[in-house]
Image (cartoon, helix red, strand yellow):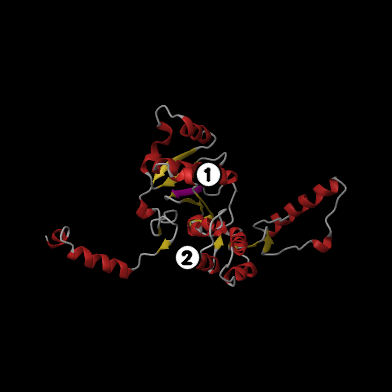
């Protein structure tokens, strides 16, 4: 149990109320297990500080020092450890897609270059300084803002909140599409991403108006679909529980939820497009007999 407040006076008042409730039931907290007037505390495995929620340095060191897995069981152990911190990593599911595929039943364990890249990327992401803001539920607090996006392989979202000076990140969330979901068209994948993340963040979003930002223009008219049927109709019915509008934001301004900076091949291997690749493309384009004339005009 954590009791917190912005001032000492308010903290003492809240602490008194919390202590009196158990006494009404004949219970009392054990003083040797109580720590009072701390500026930081570990809660649910994460250090909570005035700056926000951080990753645990001890467990992050375990991730960084983890050797290359030699079997499915070792890989599952590594993934189990990193999954505890997926809310700190944007597009965790997409980064880890090749590793998840390797743990599938009946899959031969072959450690590819894509798996190695994903393994190191997760280590790098978790070893970087990561601080998530603590959500503010006070009446005068700024609104929560979910940004979501979907690629061919996975969907991801960023839950932010407007504070006095900036927009701060509360949590990241992501998951992979299964084989059936990957066959959906773009609009359906974007809608499914929205459904999933509304279900993922209900404590922040239920009962308050908010705006969903998306880079898919069709979602602006989400509630105007004519004669929806089947799955889409069920999704639209679920949306009725929430008071929100979809706001279109072009991909160039949707960087916090957009996966366009990261391309994946069909087998889930991560490909990083560097300057040298761009130079190579330019060379071939200028020497291509069909399109070179376009550049010389």
Determine the image quadrant of residue 208.
top right
Which x, y percent locates residue 287? 18, 65
Does residue 89 lie above or below 233 as drawn?
A: below
Viewer-nearest residue: 245 or 166: 245
> Marks 1 and 2, Cα distance to the nearest angstrom?
31 Å
Residue position for label 2: 112
Viewer-nearest residue: 47 or 98: 98
Q: Are marks 1 and 2 in contact (CB under 8 Å)?
A: no
Apparent side of residue 249 relative to residue 97 in the rendered image (left or right): left
How many residues crowd mark 2 within 10 Å: few (<14), some (14–19), many (20+)? few
Whether residue 164 is visible here, answered yes or no, is: no
Does residue 119 lie above or below 191 as drawn?
A: below
Q: Main secondary structure of the magenta part?
A: strand
Range drawn in magenta:
144-149
Residue position for label 1: 196
Q: Kindly identify the residue that appears in the image at 69 percent across and 54 percent down.
A: 10
Q: Earlier in the sequence, mark 1 or mark 2?
A: 2
Q: Secondary structure at mark 1?
A: helix
Q: Secondary structure at mark 2?
A: loop
- Residue 73 has which mark? none
């Amino acid at each position: 149990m954590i009791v917190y407040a912005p001032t000492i006076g308010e903290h003492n008042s809240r602490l008194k109320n919390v202590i009196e409730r158990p006494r009404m039931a004949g219970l009392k907290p054990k003083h040797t297990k109580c720590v009072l007037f701390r500026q930081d505390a570990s809660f649910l495995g994460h250090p909570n500080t005035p700056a926000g929620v951080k990753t645990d340095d001890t467990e992050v060191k375990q991730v960084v020092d983890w050797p290359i897995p030699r079997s499915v069981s070792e890989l599952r152990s590594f993934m189990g450890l990193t999954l505890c911190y997926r809310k700190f990593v944007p597009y965790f599911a997409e980064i880890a897609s090749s590793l998840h595929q390797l743990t599938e039943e009946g899959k031969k364990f072959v450690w590819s270059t894509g798996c190695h890249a994903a393994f190191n990327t997760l280590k790098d992401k978790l070893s970087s300084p990561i601080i998530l803001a603590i959500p503010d539920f006070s009446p005068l607090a700024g609104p929560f803002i979910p940004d979501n996006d979907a690629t061919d392989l996975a969907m991801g979202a960023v839950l932010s909140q407007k504070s006095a000076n900036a927009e701060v990140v509360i949590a990241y969330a992501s998951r992979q599409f299964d084989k059936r979901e990957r066959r959906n068209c773009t609009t359906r994948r974007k809608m499914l991403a929205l459904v999933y993340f509304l279900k993922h963040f209900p404590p922040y979003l239920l009962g308050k108006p908010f705006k969903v930002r998306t880079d898919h223009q069709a979602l602006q008219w989400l509630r105007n679909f004519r004669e929806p049927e089947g799955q889409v109709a069920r999704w639209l019915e679920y949306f009725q529980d929430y008071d929100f509008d979809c706001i279109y934001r072009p991909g160039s301004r949707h960087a916090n939820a957009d996966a366009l900076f990261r391309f994946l091949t069909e087998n889930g291997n991560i490909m990083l497009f560097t300057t040298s690749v761009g130079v190579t493309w330019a060379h071939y384009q200028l020497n291509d007999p069909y399109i070179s004339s376009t550049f010389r005009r």
